[in-house]
Image (tube, rainbow, N blue to C red):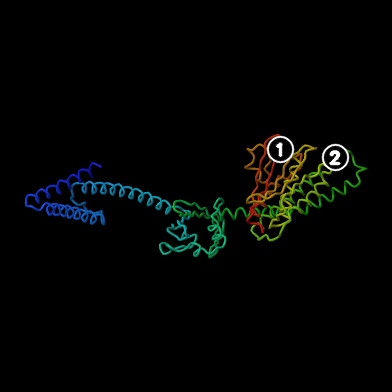
Amino acid sequence: MMEWLSAFSKVLIVVTAGGLLGWFVGHPLVGITVAALAVVFFWSRQMWRLEHWLRDTSGSPPDVSGIWGEMVARVYKQNKVADSTEKRLQSTVDYLLDSFSAMRDGVVIVEGNQSIRWSNEAAQRLLGLQYPEDIGQLITNLVRLPEFNEYLESGDYSQPLVFEMTGNIKRNLQLVVTQFAEGDTLLFLTDVTDLVRTEQMRTDFVGNVSHELRTPLTVISGYLDTFQADVSGLPAPYIRGLKHMTAQARRMESLLKDLLWLSKIESTAHRIKDQRVDMAGLLAELSDEVASLYPDRPLQLQVDSQDSIIGEHRELHSAISNLVLNAYKYSAPDGQVSVSWRSEARSLRLEVTDKGIGIDPSHFPRLTERFYRVDESRSSVSGGTGLGLAIVKHVATAHGAHLEINSQPGQGSTFSLVFPLHDQA
């Protein structure tokens, strides 16, 4: 403010001096006009010098005085600060890019329209990209895999994508997407081929062993049934032994059945499921089955929606029946179990609720692991295989749903399957 007052005072002095000089020669207006023109010329020249310097501030600032000098000094100072900030930012960017370049995992930076801005050597090797030739190219045009493109366009990156790159060497890659400033996206690619192969070998091993054990176990069970058909001539200890062996054979048969079923679900998880499953009808069918097992404890049904699910009837029946039977197993002999089916704002929800013994929330993260048991002694009494919730989880994933658990010890449990509404026809 003081600079502008000083500049105005100087202009006023010049104009006044011009007026006085003109008054002495008999033309005061001419003197004022000449003085004003001189001020305008001086200011115009200063503005021209300032504008000329602003075009290229890398040079030395002009030697100007007064308010113009103050303006040049401020612009020069701000320009220095901006240059320093830009150099620090560029140094940080260079450091990050050097770090990304040294990574064994692939890194690709794409802009908001999916065009490539930068990629490291690992990404070029894994995805077949070329840098810098591919700068500005759409990554969806260069990586022609439907699941890869659909994943990027979906905008939902809460779960990583595992996909297979075909070519001379087949690779399984895991894609993790992170979005940052101004809509740019960071793609991290990890070669998980060995992990996928190991998991496939494990799955194949479990399936093959389970299949091979079925035949000898069937033979053993057949002979046990034959022996128990007439036990009149056997001592009591032998009879008890046969009953115990039969019970354990039945349990092993149930375990093998669940293992084979889980293996089948895993192997067909990525197949298109196009059946329209009437959930109200499925629940009614399940209620009839439960009635034969627990005649004194009918299943309480609450069907508030007639929406169907696009999926696979047998898998959905298996998942829901596992939840319902678990609810009965871990409830009191007179405890009621209820199932509800309803639509919500953006989802369809199936809930199985019991008033049983409940589960401590600390167990929730591991409940869907194979053979995980909250209480070994309780599980042996119930006769469960430890695979029920693993089957539920895989069925839910294959149908685009997720499993929610709400429980407290002594207060019962609620298991929910939540299906996204937009995926249903």
Q: Position of residue 107 (x, y in %)?
A: 46, 55
Q: For residue 425, which quarter of the picture?
A: bottom right
Q: CA distance from mark 2 to mark 1?
A: 36 Å
Question: What number of labels is visible?
Answer: 2
Image coords of residue 266 (percent x, y)? 66, 55
Would you identify the image quadrant in which residue 248 lies? top right
Residue where numbered disc 1 is placed: 412
Relative depth, front residue between 162 and 195: 162
Q: Amino acid at mark 1?
A: Gly
Dot 2 or dot 1, earlier in sequence: 2
Rendered position, 397 above or below 406: below
Q: On screen, 409 above or below 73?
A: above
Residue 211 lies, with reference to residue 336, above or below; the image says: below
338 or 23, which is in the foreground?
23
In the visual, does 260 lie left or right of 29?
right
Report the residue that reaches farthest toward the right. 232
The amino acid pointed to by label 2 is Arg
Q: Which mark is residue 216?
A: none
Q: Secondary structure at mark 2?
A: helix
Q: Which residue is mark 2?
A: 240
Residue extending furthest toward the front: 26
Near-viewer residue (406 or 422) = 422
Asked whether, in this view, residue 220 is left or right of residue 137, the answer is right
> Element at badge 1?
loop
Q: Position of residue 373 (x, y in %)?
A: 69, 41
Q: In the image as oriented, which residue stretches furthest toward the top?
A: 410
Q: Quadrant of the N terminus?
A: top left
Residue at position x 21%, y 51% in the image: 61
**Nearer the viewer's eye, disc 2 or disc 1?**
1
Q: Is disc 1 surrounded by few (<14), some (14 to 19) or many (20+) residues within 10 Å?
A: many
Mark 2 Cα shell of 10 Å, populated few (<14), some (14-19), many (≥20): few
